[in-house]
Amino acid sequence: MAQKKQEKFSSKNVKVNRDELSITKIGEITTTEQSSTFVLILFGCILVFIFFLPTIVNWIKGSDDKPDYSILENNKDSNKTEKPDTPIQGAVEDYYNFSDTLSISLEAGITISNFIMNANGLSFTVSNTNETRFYFNKDNYFLELYTEDNTLLERIILSDVVVASKNNMVLEFAISDTTRNSMKKLLFVKKDRVMYPDILLEKNENQEEFLTCIKGGETITYTFKESKLNRITEAINYDITNPNYSVLLEQWKTDSEKLNSVEGITSIFVNTGNGFLVNTVIDLKNVKNSNLESTHYYPNETFAKVVKFEMEARGFQCK
């Protein structure tokens, strides 16, 4: 027997019972609609939709909602450690055996040769075949001198040197007797200032941090605040027994006059007859860096470890 066709629901078929507390029937769910299988399928579809909803949203947004890697990159940069001193070539070849036939290709167009050890110190020739000047300070170069078993004897800063294009320059550096007698190897190395060793400064009677560097007749006192340089005091004292006295006399007289003309610098030159004295005070807060021609004069707020490390590489004793 054929089933009776189910009538479609229509608001026109609804009859509202207006008696109090009575129930108005607006329709009914058939037996098929009440089956548990249908309910399970319905809830299953809902759960699947909820589970894949984030993926669907990201697919719709496309490249406008890509993961933000900037935070990871910033963290990587902030935790980055500086590279240690970088030798010029491979690990074994870095230490060159000293000899007068040694020739080193430092960079493209830059060759170092003619190494000579004598009573005056160590000398060598830098050849620049490039079309431009070569500045050793570009990569903060140092020359390090070692014993046979790779024990460091002395370190010489080269960043003060500039070699003209298509030119050769002979460099000579004074070294100690110990180095002269024990040096067997050498190494050219680039150094990052960040990697210089930290130092502990003493304080004067005014509770100012200071570092005193001495070499021959030159005494330079660097004053710091929280390890940052703010003043330089230089005292020069040479007498007529110095073999280079005449040259030094004229040089320092000229330098003192030039320094004294710069705002923030006071320099006094005194010729005693048997020698000469120069006293210079540099208030770095009031001096432009361009006015400081000497490599011994560092800009305002230079870190103390930089001053000590580099001045000792110029042959000064600093403490």
Image: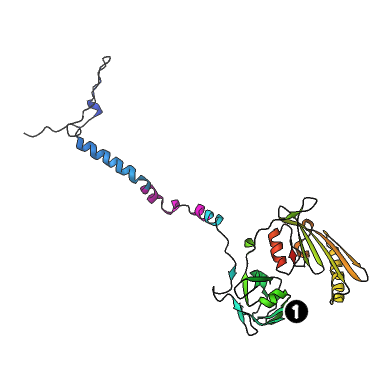
Q: Give the mark count.
A: 1
Residue type at mark 1 is Asn
List the single residue furthest toward the bottom.
101
**Residue 316 versus residue 172 in the image, above or below:** above
Residue 155, x across and y down, in percent: 67, 70
Apparent side of residue 144 relative to residue 260 in the rendered image (left or right): left
Colour mode of the rendering: rainbow
Q: Main secondary structure of the magenta part?
A: helix
Name the residue carrying label 1: 120
Q: Determine which quarter of the picture holds residue 156.
A: bottom right
Q: Residue at x 60, y 67 (%)?
A: 85
Residue 213, x across and y down, in percent: 76, 63
Residue 236 in sight: yes
Residue 107 in sight: no
Residue 157 magenta-highlighted: no
List the single residue furthest toward the top.
20
Q: Determine which quarter of the picture holds residue 268.
A: bottom right
Residue 62 magenta-highlighted: yes
Considering depth in this image, is 168 or 113 the residue closer to the camera?
113
Label 1: state its secondary structure: loop
Q: Determine which quarter of the picture holds residue 201.
A: bottom right
Which segment is the magenta one? 55-73
Q: Residue at x 30, y 41 (%)?
A: 47
Q: Residue at x 30, y 44 (%)?
A: 48
Residue 31, x across and y down, in percent: 17, 32
Residue 232, x across and y down, in percent: 79, 60
**Residue 230 versus residue 191 in the image, above or below:** above
Apparent side of residue 209 relative to residue 152 in the rendered image (left or right): right
Considering depth in this image, is 87 or 26 the residue closer to the camera?
87
List the single residue furthest toward the left.
1
Which quarter of the rendered picture does the C terminus lie within?
bottom right
Considering depth in this image, is 119 or 293 the residue closer to the camera?
119
